[in-house]
Amino acid sequence: MIELFARYPRLVDTLPWRALGDWPTPVQQADPGFHGEACAGLWLKRDDRCAEPYGGNKVRKLEFLLGAALEQGCRGVFTFGVAGSNHALATAVYAAALGLEARLLLTPQSNSSFVGRNLRMGRWAGARHVHCPTEAAARNAARALELHGPQPAFYRVPGGGSSPLGAVGFVNAGLELAAQVRAGLLPAPDAIYVALGTMGTAAGLALGLAAAGLKTRLVLVRVVRQDIASPERFRALYHGAARLLHRADPRFPLRPLERARIEVRHDFIGPGYARFTAAGMAALGEARAAFDIGLEGTYTGKAFAALLADLRAGRLAGQHALFWNTYNGQPMPAAALALDYRTLPTPFHRYFEAPYQPLDPEA
Ligand SMILES: Cc1ncc(COP(=O)(O)O)c(C=O)c1O
């Protein structure tokens, strides 16, 4: 049973949820030789292999969102993202696992080797990819899917899975980490480093940690445009998730958002979303040395680069820091990688034919 339901049993009957992952995800400590005196301890939260065949942070959100789609009797779901969106891929994979159709409304992005891999795996999972030249076009395509009579046939999964209900997956993650601290598996972290995109991960985590009484500081490394990762949206997700849980079980505490515990870092995004940076790409090698994990250049490389910079600047001296690995660590199925990309709509072919951006590991 997930920690949220163990602590608040009334939620079992009041929240939509379908099991997709294997919880709790392990915590792992880096060899002290990696950081020396720069911090007291460096830890990793391993959401990378939380589910099969695709891990990463989206699984926790989808357990609730796809649960809601099933509860509402929908035939499928649709969601938004850029062409290589990890969230869109995770939605495709787990919608199919639960017998739901998936429509992915995808906007253009800079090219990298992972974009083609994610497109292929989404197709392999049976999703239908819809090329949307702009975000406005994606909204129009969504409206067309929603206009299906009084009962929507397609459930709207928000971009990144970040609605209050999706964020509840990370409230559970915060409670799960607190239970691991109580069990003596790691000390209470002074700081958690995590990539900041559509913010459901961070807002849910902030709420879960507050509900568990942990005083951890969240260091949120922004990797998307500022209007997507805005303080207003963060507050709306945090309080929205808190109200939803409190309504479903009044024992769930309505705690204020303690701004002092939240630090947003704007200095690691580089030229923009999904545009790789030298620091972010260098961090991939360091993450492999510290934990033997594979990160990527859009989210986790930039977040780990922030952690490394703080270690080097002496900002973590005497502290325990935890890096939350939000990226999938499962190998892609061979059949997905072998899929003929020409089975995708033509506008997506360019991700297989055009050059990758210069810092791409396969460029
Ligand atoms: C690997 C990875 N890390 C972090 C994030 C950011 O999570 P959130 O959108 O909840 O802020 C994403 C979102 O797509 C992601 O794919």
Image (spheres, rainbow, N blue to C red):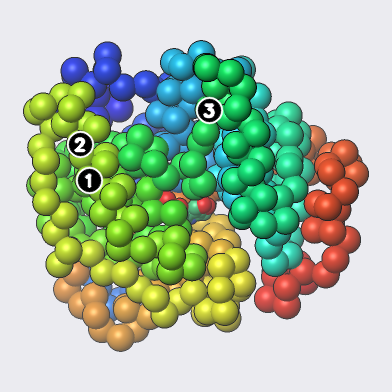
Q: What is the quadrant of the C terminus in the image? A: bottom right
The residue carrying mark 2 is 243
Q: Earlier in the sequence, mark 3 or mark 1?
A: 3
Residue shown at 40% from the left, 62% from the top: 229
Residue 238 seen anywhere in this rendered image of the structure: yes
Give coordinates of residue 286: x percent, y percent.
49, 71
Residue shown at 16% from the left, 54% from the top: 257
Given the current orientation, which residue lies at the most extreme bottom position?
313
**In the rendered structure, are the residues bearing label 2 and label 1 in contact, judged by CB atoms less than 8 Å apart?**
yes
Q: Earlier in the sequence, mark 3 or mark 2?
A: 3
What is the C-alpha distance between the residues marked 3 and 2?
Answer: 22 Å
Give coordinates of residue 284: x percent, y percent.
54, 68
Crowd tier of the residue under label 2, counting other residues whose Cα lies within 10 Å: few below 14, some 14–19, many 20 or above: some
What is the C-alpha distance between the residues marked 3 and 1?
Answer: 23 Å
Residue shown at 79% from the left, 35% from the top: 335
The residue carrying mark 3 is 155
Of the residues shown, which amino acid type is indicated by label 1?
His
Q: Is residue 264 above or below residue 252?
A: below
SS at mark 1 in the image: helix
Crowd tier of the residue under label 3, counting other residues whose Cα lies within 10 Å: few below 14, some 14–19, many 20 or above: many
Give coordinates of residue 233: x percent, y percent.
34, 55
Q: What is the quadrant of the N terminus in the image? A: top left
The residue carrying mark 1 is 239
Of the residues shown, which amino acid type is indicated by label 2?
Arg
Q: Please state if 114 lies on the left or on the right of 285 as rendered.
A: right
Give coordinates of residue 86: x percent, y percent.
58, 48
Q: Is residue 244 above or below residue 148?
A: below
Q: Nearer the viewer, residue 144 or 88?
A: 144
Q: Nearer the viewer, residue 350 or 336?
A: 350
